[in-house]
Image: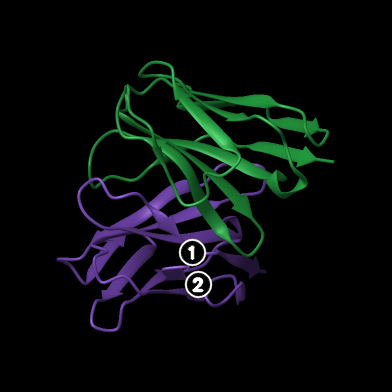
Chain colours: A green, B purple
């Protein structure tokens, strides 16, 4: 049982480049989330998908787009990377209400 | 505007002693609280939770206390073990499908 799988684990981008972070869960969870972790800031919500076919903005959505491809997959896209997007990105999923999230192991992104 | 605050960025405790981690929140609509543990290069893992209808929840060496009037919760780890050295995040949500909001984290170091 893999849980939540994120790819890639590491990435270095040049300013202005684009990339897509992939996330897949095999637990049949309804809701999926993208967070970023920065020193002293904790985890901040970028976008989420409450169920297949829906997506909504979180706390820090600027510069990002998402796609809920199907129930399993939720991708995060950076169209034009900026140094301020250097961070560790975590994908998470949740099966139902009032339940904790299961997190992936993260993608460490550096934008130079 | 961080609604979940962990004011102690770090905590050092001797093996076998009690670790007490604190968390304050400002949003009175929060009704579900969780603690996550995070090791380096891994995603956060769920530790323990409590709903607002309770004031205490225990799971083995871990106990979470909730003081709603003070908008404060704490995590007690007794006894502390070297494997408890990690970053601990407090999180809160409001409503059944509320999104989790996280504190900045507390780095715990358990010394021999």
Q: Is residue A75 above or below residue A42?
A: above
Say if residue B78 shows up in the picture.
no
Residue shown at 52% from the left, 60% from the top: B88
Residue shown at 60% from the left, 67% from the top: B108
Q: Is residue A110 above or below residue A28?
A: below
Dot 2: element:
loop
Which residue is nearer to you in this view: B57 or B90?
B90
* Residue corresponding to mark 2: B6
Q: Specify the farthest residue to the top.
A: A70
Mark sitting on residue B41: none
* Residue corresponding to mark 1: B103
Point out the image quarter for the C terminus of chain B: bottom right
Say if residue B95 shows up in the picture.
yes
Position of residue A72 measured from the top left corner of the image (x, y, whole percent): 40, 19
Q: Say which chain tag 2 marks.
A: B
Q: Are marks 2 and 1 in contact (CB under 8 Å)?
A: yes
Q: Say which chain tag 1 marks.
A: B
Q: How many numbered discs sit on the rendered protein?
A: 2
């Amino acid at each position: 049982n893999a849980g939540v799988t994120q790819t890639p684990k590491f990435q270095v981008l040049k300013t202005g480049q684009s990339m897509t972070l992939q996330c897949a869960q095999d637990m049949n969870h309804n809701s999926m989330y993208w967070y970023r972790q920065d020193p002293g800031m904790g985890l901040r919500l970028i976008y989420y998908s409450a169920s297949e076919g829906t997506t909504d903005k979180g706390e820090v959505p600027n510069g990002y787009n998402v796609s809920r491809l199907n129930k399993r997959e939720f991708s995060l896209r950076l169209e034009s990377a900026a140094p301020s997007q250097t961070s560790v990105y975590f994908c998470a999923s949740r099966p139902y209400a009032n339940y904790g999230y299961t997190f992936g192991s993260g993608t460490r992104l550096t934008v130079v | 505007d961080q609604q979940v605050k962990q004011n102690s960025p770090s905590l050092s405790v001797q093996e076998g002693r009690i670790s007490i981690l604190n968390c304050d929140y400002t949003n009175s609509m929060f009704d579900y609280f969780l603690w996550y543990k995070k090791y380096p290069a891994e995603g956060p893992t769920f530790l323990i939770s409590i709903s607002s209808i309770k004031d205490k929840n225990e799971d083995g060496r871990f106990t979470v206390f909730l003081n709603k009037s003070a908008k404060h919760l704490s995590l007690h780890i007794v006894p502390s073990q070297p494997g408890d050295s990690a970053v601990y995040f407090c999180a809160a949500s409001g409503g059944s499908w509320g999104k989790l909001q996280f504190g900045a984290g507390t780095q715990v170091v358990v010394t021999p």
